[in-house]
Amino acid sequence: MFSDDLFEHADRQIQTKTLPSPAIPIHTSNTHRIMYRLTAYPISPKQATFIGLFAVCFWSSVIGLIRTLSLHMGAVGGAAVMYSLATILLLLIFGKPDLRRFSRNYLFWAGIFFVGCELCLSLSIGYADNARQTVEIGMVNYLWPTFTIIGAVWFNKQPAKWWIAIGFALSFIGIAIVLGGEGGLSPAHIYRNVLANPAGYIMALLDALFWAAYCTLTARVKAQGNAVGFFFFLVSCVLWAKYFAGSYGSLNFDTESVLYALAAASCMGLGYAVWNIGISRGNMTVLAGASYFIPVFSALISSFLLDAPLPTEFWQGAAMVCIGSAVCWLATQKKA
């Protein structure tokens, strides 16, 4: 996204300039104080990139946890509880976001992309017909690293080699193999599989596109702040509105349900918190490139949590998605 010269210039500014310590409320907790400094005090692009990489660990667990939570609380109710808890977590860590630091145009479009992304993600997983379909839908969602790099090249003018198209093609071929099941690239198998739950697969694809758009926009405007808590609040409001407007029954708050809700909210909230720091202040192409490990890690964790054995063809397709993302990333890197 940004040139190496820009990163070096920013590093020199941080190293040579005396920067004032941000004002910290007297009655702020120690945890809040640490995270306030992390988000408000200027950090180098390398540090921001390192922080953003922790999102890979958190997000690899999200698909399986969301599905398990939806089985206990329902697709809509479970998602509403999860995003509400994640919102509280983000507010406790980062405090109330200062929306004055963002333009109204950014808040509007980023809000649309973020809310659209989260609704598509949670509902596509929650409404999956079975455990295996959950993992497949999750894999479609993991086209977002490829879309993110394409967005960086197309909209943010990130230089790239011509063979980035090969990576893009590999990612889609990998998804086709995943959707084909034991039939591999058989069009008949792919069609029959997608037709079983077209809304789920379409929402997963939209989720990937929305998230790539959010990442590209946040990087383009060089957002100096963390509005992710505000966006999570919006997602929570939309989900609760949908829950109370429909007939979804009462929520089940037994011990197991609460534990899964807390685990899912923690992975989701912390993942977005560190990722937002990374993409707004770090190297987005490095982060997107590193994220190609998520599909395999996520499939492994989801397969374990949901007790869903996966065929060899699935892993072949998942590997191609990872390789495709890696090729896209390498195509944007300068020669040493």
Image (cartoon, grey):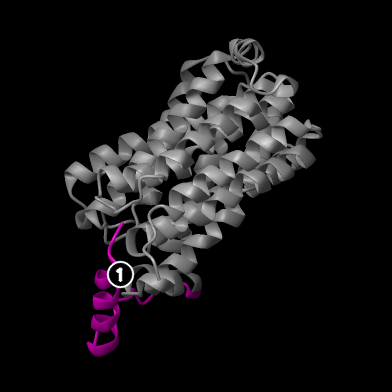
45 or 250: nearer the eye? 45
Tell me where residue 146 appears, x and y as whole percent: 45, 42
- Which residues, given as a range, are shown in magenta? 1-30
Residue in the image at 64% along x and 42% along y: 319
The magenta stretch spans residue 20:
yes
Looking at the rendered structure, the kind of residue marked 1 is Asp
Residue in the image at 81% along x and 33% along y: 309
- Residue 153 visible in the shown view: yes
Q: Residue 118 vs residue 195: left or right? A: left
- Residue 70 visible in the shown view: no
324 or 166: nearer the eye? 166
Residue in the image at 39% along x and 50% along y: 228
The magenta stretch spans residue 39:
no
Q: Residue 251 vs residue 313: left or right? A: left
Examine the image and state in which quarter residue 108 appears.
top left
Tell me where residue 328 appears, x and y as whole percent: 44, 47
Q: Which type of secondary structure does the marked residue at label 1 adopt?
A: helix
Residue in the image at 41% along x and 29% along y: 238
55 or 291: nearer the eye? 291
Q: Which residue is mark 1?
A: 4
